[in-house]
Amino acid sequence: MTTPTMDIHEILKLLPHRYPFLLVDRVLAIDKGKSIKALKNVSINEPFFGGHFPHRPVMPGVLMLEAMAQAAALLSFHMMGAKPDDNSVYYFAGIDGARFKRPVGPGDQLVMDVTLERSKSGIYKFKGISRVGEEVACEAELMCTMRTIA
């Protein structure tokens, strides 16, 4: 069953990221334990555009992957009914099959569809596809895990 959206205030309660590294602006839909659809509004004011590339601003591919991982983390927290605490952190464990199909630039809305493929021994595997409109911008398989920190 799909749940209502999640606004930035709810996202800030779940993700430890802050400006300029918070890359999810809104959750459009969550199907608990299955999938999430999230949104990143890409603005000319993004700090990375000054150097990537000044004459033709392009969102770095690694940040598109990070945005999908942040959406995956939100899906995981929602699925577990848990909130992160100061003693744990959600890490990338791997990225496979990353492909970049379309540049993402100022004024674009990056819509991320992330689906949980499997969960085993605390490692979650997701399939992520990011689009601008109907065009695929990025896709990858993401593996993430929660770890306790000292």
Image (cartoon, grey):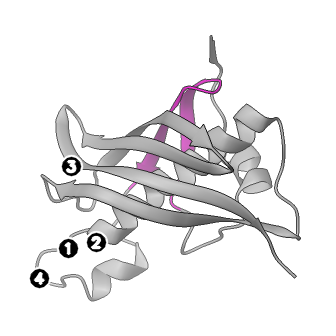
Mark 1 and mark 3 lie on one chain; the one further toward the N terminus is 1
Q: Measuring 17% from the left and 57% from the top, which residue is drawn there?
A: 100
Residue at numbered disc 3? 137
Q: Are marks 4 and 1 in contact (CB under 8 Å)?
A: no
Residue 57: mark in rendering: 1
Q: Which residues are magenta?
A: 23-41
Q: Going by the image, does 102 lie left or right of 141? A: left
Report the residue marked by disc 4: 55
Q: Amino acid at mark 4?
A: His
Q: Which residue is mark 2?
A: 60
Q: Are marks 3 and 4 in contact (CB under 8 Å)?
A: no
Which residue type carries mark 3? Ala
In the image, 74 versus 47, the foreground residue is 74
Helix, strand or loop for disc 1: loop
Q: Quadrant of the N terminus?
A: top right
Q: Nearer the viewer, residue 56 or 98?
A: 98
Q: Position of residue 16 (x, y in %)?
A: 72, 66
Q: Residues within 10 Å of mark 2 (few under 14, many from 20)?
A: some
Q: Is residue 25 visible?
A: no
Measure how far apart labels 1 and 3 are at the Cα level: 15 Å
User: On screen, 60 above or below 118?
Assistant: below
Q: Amino acid at mark 2?
A: Pro
Say which residue appears at 87% left-offset and 82% top-offset.
150
Up the image or down, 114 lies above or below 54; here it is above
Where is residue 13 drawn, in percent x and y? 80, 53
Q: Amino acid at mark 1?
A: Pro
